[in-house]
């Protein structure tokens, strides 16, 4: 740990700025593929909660206006429409 502190003091504490694309200069094909998969998975994860909120709201609406005779039919319709 002392060696790192000495090295940073010798450099004067300056850090070289790197562009956004420069950070990926040494990334290989596997690295880029994993970053792409992670980005797609993060987007899917972010979209899941709002979509489930819409579906859940439709199911609650189906319960609200249904009678005991047709509640299952209305919930099934909402479920099939969501898929």
Image: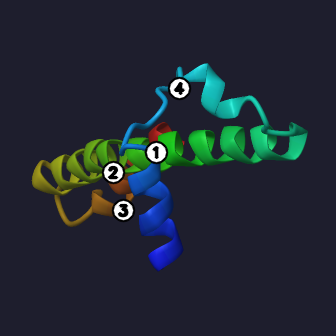
Instruction: Say what secondary structure mark 4 lies in.
Output: loop
Instruction: Say what secondary structure mark 1 lies in.
Output: loop
Q: Mark 2 vs mark 3: give the one in front.
A: 2
Judge from the rendering whether residue 19 lies leftward or rightward of residue 28; answer left or right: left
Residue at (40, 45) in percent of width and height: 46
Of the 4 image quadrants, the one containing the C terminus is: top right
- Label 2, label 3: how far apart the Cα atoms are: 24 Å
- Label 4, label 2: how far apart the Cα atoms are: 36 Å
Q: Mark 1 vs mark 2: give the one in front.
A: 1
Q: Circle 1 is placed at which residue position?
A: 11
Residue 13 horizontal/vertical position (percent): 36, 45
Proximity of marks 3 and 1: CB atoms separated by less than 8 Å: no
Q: Which mark is residue 49?
A: 2
Q: Which mark is residue 33?
A: none
Residue 51 horizontal/vertical position (percent): 36, 42
In the image, 80 versus 7, the foreground residue is 7
Q: Circle 4 is placed at which residue position?
A: 18
Nearest to N terminus: mark 4 or mark 2: 4
Judge from the rendering whether residue 26 lies leftward or rightward of residue 41; answer left or right: right
Of all residues, the one furthest to the bottom in this rendering is: 1
Residue 47 horizontal/vertical position (percent): 41, 41
- Label 3, label 1: how far apart the Cα atoms are: 72 Å
Q: Circle 3 is placed at which residue position?
A: 72
Judge from the rendering whether residue 39 lies leftward or rightward of residue 37; answer left or right: left
Residue 58 horizontal/vertical position (percent): 25, 44
Q: Quadrant of residue 24?
A: top right
Q: Mark 4 vs mark 3: give the one in front.
A: 4
Judge from the rendering whether residue 5 lies leftward or rightward of residue 70; answer left or right: right
């Amino acid at each position: 740990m002392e060696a790192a502190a000495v090295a940073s003091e010798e450099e004067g504490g300056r850090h070289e700025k790197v562009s956004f694309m420069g950070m990926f200069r040494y990334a290989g094909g596997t690295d880029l593929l994993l970053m792409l998969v992670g980005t797609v998975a993060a987007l899917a994860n972010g979209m899941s909660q709002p979509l489930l909120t819409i579906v859940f709201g439709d199911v609650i609406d189906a319960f609200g206006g249904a009678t005991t005779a047709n509640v299952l039919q209305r919930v099934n319709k909402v479920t099939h429409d969501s898929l």
